[in-house]
Image (spheres, helix red, strand yellow):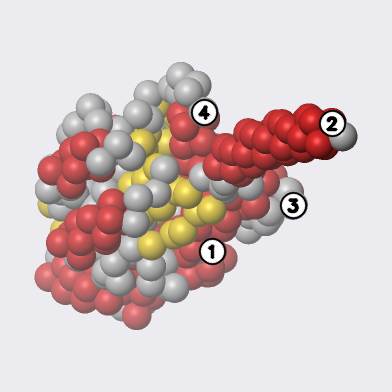
Amino acid sequence: MAGRMLKRRAIILACLSVLIAAAAVFGTKVFRDQLVTKPKKIAVVIKVTEDSMEFWQVLGDGVRAAAKEFGVEADVVGPPSESDIQGQIAIVEQAIEEKPDAIVLAATDMNLLVPVAKKVKDAGIVLLTVDSSLKSDVPLSLIATDNVEAGKKAGQAMADLLSGPSKVAISSYVKDTSTQIERERGVREALGAYDNIEIVGTFYSDGIEQKAYETMKRLLTEHPDLSGIVGLNEASTVGAGKAIRELGLAGTVKLVGFDSSVDEVKLLEEGIMQTTVIQRPFNMGYLSVKTALQALNGEKVPPVIDTGSIMISKDNIYTEENQKLLFPFVDQ
């Protein structure tokens, strides 16, 4: 009798051991599955978080739309000013400390952000760039407008507005940003094909609308023979437009701009600006998250993704297609 009880107890203990081992294996698998399905974290570091800069607000909308669709965590951060290069570097370094799976960077300076980009790689974090490139092979992909081509479009649009001997100024933003350099190159290439057009210079606003306004107002006062201004981003365009408006030079001094903020739409409607290059910031933000996730999943991603650009004027601003570009929404 005692022998049978001992045998039965041994069988029960053996069964319990099997159950405990199975539970441990199952628990480990569940934990492992939880790790696999844990949402990826992506830090998107833009050039400026100022609310008045609509380009970056719309890009952020694209980031959030993609994050919701693909089930990832995406934080949009950046310095308060586009000229705060050291501030952006510090933000990237802080992002590295927080160990996201990927960082998407819109570099304020194509050279000065290179060392921190290397730190991102050394930390084992995937790096992509959006809008602006780096002089580095660290980023896996650049999601941006073809800025040289966009600059050529702006330059050609200005040339088409002018006749006879003409002087043109370029209203720019942060000097060593890749987008600025490429757009200026495109503008100069296009205008350089015309013997009657003289470029009087490039004037930098550090991405500050008020500075662009003051600079262009002073330039227009000192050079009453100026025929046109090409603005290379939202702030430099709006600042120039406000100077033209205040001096009563609408239509006399032609204005070609970049981007599509509410203020720029008003400049078009008032006839102060004749045409503007529209980018696709929503698409940039959306595709930056999608591409980062593809890279994290081991997929090969294109080194450059061109999000395109088109010209919009008062004549075509109200078409359905252009209204969607001017006022992008998640459900479009």
**Residue hosting label 3:** 331
Contact between marks 3 and 1 (CB within 8 A): the answer is: no
In the visual, does 79 lie left or right of 77?
left
Q: Which of marks 4 and 3 is nearer the N terminus?
A: 4
The numbered dot on residue 179 is: none
Does residue 176 sit above or below 298 in this rendering? below
**Residue hosting label 1:** 265
Q: Which of marks 1 and 2 is nearer the N terminus?
A: 2
**Residue hosting label 4:** 297
Residue 117 in which image quadrant: top left
Amino acid type shown at disc 3: Asp
In the visual, does 324 lie left or right of 220?
right
Q: Which of marks 3 and 1 is nearer the N terminus?
A: 1
The secondary element bearing badge 2 is classed as: helix
**Residue hosting label 2:** 4
State the separation of the CA atoms marked 1 and 2.
Answer: 92 Å
Q: Nearer the viewer, residue 93 or 279?
A: 93
State the separation of the CA atoms marked 3 and 1.
Answer: 22 Å
Q: Residue furthest top?
A: 300
The secondary element bearing badge 4 is classed as: loop
The secondary element bearing badge 3 is classed as: loop
- The residue positioned 46% from the left and 59% from the top of the image is 75
Q: Is residue 130 visible?
A: no
Discs 3/1, front: 3
- The residue positioned 67% from the left and 46% from the top of the image is 69
Discs 4/3, front: 4
Contact between marks 1 and 2 (CB within 8 A): the answer is: no
Discs 1/4, front: 4
Q: Earlier in the sequence, mark 1 or mark 4?
A: 1
